[in-house]
Image (cartoon, rainbow, N blue to C red):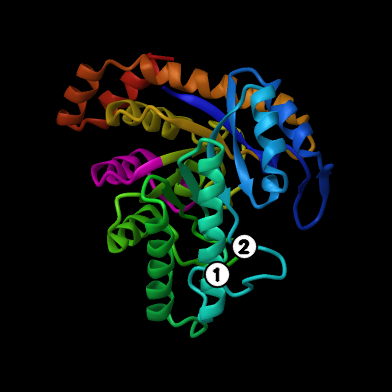
């Protein structure tokens, strides 16, 4: 069953390199805020930030009747693993991150969640001749494989991204993410498809979803939008309306019936109002995609006449 969640990091302090937009909230304040948003059924928790008091966390989740879509393992941290963690050239750093990822997997199971998502943003490079690519890929594969073997019933979802904070992340697009998962070769290692990251990487998100699903590696979905230049984490459909319609059409065809987590950056706007808009707009985009008749779409795809296709699509608005 399709359900919506919010990543907890977007329910507290919101800042970029220039401005602090929102103040930090306690864990209780974040979960209370999420529970007050229409059509939000859960949260994506952040590890280690949200796990300081596991018993309080479980109590608050129960109190606010919130599910947990995933546990977001933060592999980039101030003062730690400055040149990457999973792919670090230092064996002690790789040991540290594997040990911590195993703890995050245990913590996820303890709250009834069988999914870890992680965006390896700091695994990458800024300059040519900065990284030993052979060592980086080998180390990355080995660390994820070791963690995945710790709990085979917990899925580890690799969220790819083209850049930021590195000029080029090691896993920057859906193809690279899929190749990585196939190299690891474990059934519980797959991909988080963040549609904004797909768009920024120059992908058609629907095509990426199909590619990942064909290999049984589409594990989880994040929703947001951007201008194809930078990962702005905007409301779904703000820029790429038809990409979303096609994306939701193909997710239905794939049979994806799982959580969608909003990865949306509420800058100077009210946080609750922002996520109410996110759910409302997403439901509308889904509803529009459901207006498309599958038989007619399939027939048009065989004819491959974009003029006919675009006229049909606009007739449904």
Q: Please tell me whether residue 207 is drawn above or below residue 272 in the rendered image.
A: below
Q: Residue at x 46, y 38 (%)?
A: 221
Which numbered dot is residue 85?
Answer: 1
Q: Quadrant of residue 68?
A: top right
Dot 1 alpha-carbon crowd within 10 angstroms: few under 14, some 14 to 19, many 20 or more: many
Residue 127 in view of the camera: no
**How far separated are the C-alphas under marks 1 and 2?**
7 Å
Q: Are the two marked residues, 1 and 2, in contact with CB atoms closer than 8 angstroms?
A: yes
Q: Which residue is mark 2?
A: 76
66 or 152: nearer the eye?
A: 152
Which numbered dot is residue 222?
Answer: none
108 or 252: nearer the eye?
A: 108
Quadrant for the N terminus in the image:
top left
Quadrant for the C terminus in the image:
top left
Residue 110 percent location from the top left of the image: 55, 41
Left/right of residue 250 with respect to residue 91 in the rendered view: left
175 or 51: nearer the eye?
A: 51
Left/right of residue 273 with respect to residue 261 in the rendered view: right
Q: What residue range appears in magenta?
A: 199-219
Tag 1's secondary structure?
Answer: loop
The stretch drawn in magenta includes residue 200: yes
């Amino acid at each position: 069953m399709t359900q919506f969640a919010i990543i907890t990091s977007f329910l507290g302090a919101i800042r970029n390199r220039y401005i602090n937009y929102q103040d930090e909230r306690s864990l209780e304040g974040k979960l209370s805020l999420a529970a007050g948003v229409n059509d939000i059924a859960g949260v994506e928790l952040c590890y280690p930030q949200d796990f300081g008091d596991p018993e309080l966390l479980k109590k608050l989740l129960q109190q606010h009747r919130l599910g947990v879509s995933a546990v977001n393992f933060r592999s980039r941290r101030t003062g730690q693993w400055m040149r990457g963690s999973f792919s670090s050239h230092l064996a002690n750093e790789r040991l540290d991150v594997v040990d911590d990822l195993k703890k995050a997997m245990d913590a996820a199971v303890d709250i009834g969640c069988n999914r870890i998502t992680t965006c390896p943003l700091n695994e990458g490079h800024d300059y040519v001749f900065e990284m030993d690519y052979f060592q980086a890929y080998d180390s990355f594969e080995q660390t994820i494989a070791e963690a995945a073997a710790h709990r085979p019933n917990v899925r580890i979802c690799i969220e790819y991204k083209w850049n930021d904070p590195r000029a080029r992340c090691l896993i920057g697009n859906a193809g690279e993410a899929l190749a990585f998962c196939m190299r690891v070769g474990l059934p519980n290692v797959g991909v988080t498809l963040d549609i904004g990251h797909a768009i920024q990487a120059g992908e058609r998100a629907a095509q990426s979803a199909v590619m990942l699903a064909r290999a049984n590696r589409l594990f989880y979905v994040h929703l947001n939008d951007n201008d194809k230049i930078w990962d702005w984490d905007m409301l779904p459909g703000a820029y790429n309306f038809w990409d979303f319609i096609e994306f939701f059409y193909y997710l239905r065809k794939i049979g994806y019936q799982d959580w969608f987590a909003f990865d949306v950056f509420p800058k100077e706007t009210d946080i609750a109002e922002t996520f109410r808009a996110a759910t409302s707009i997403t439901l509308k985009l889904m509803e529009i995609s459901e207006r498309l008749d599958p038989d007619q779409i399939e027939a048009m795809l065989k004819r491959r006449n974009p003029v006919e296709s675009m006229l049909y699509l606009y007739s449904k608005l």
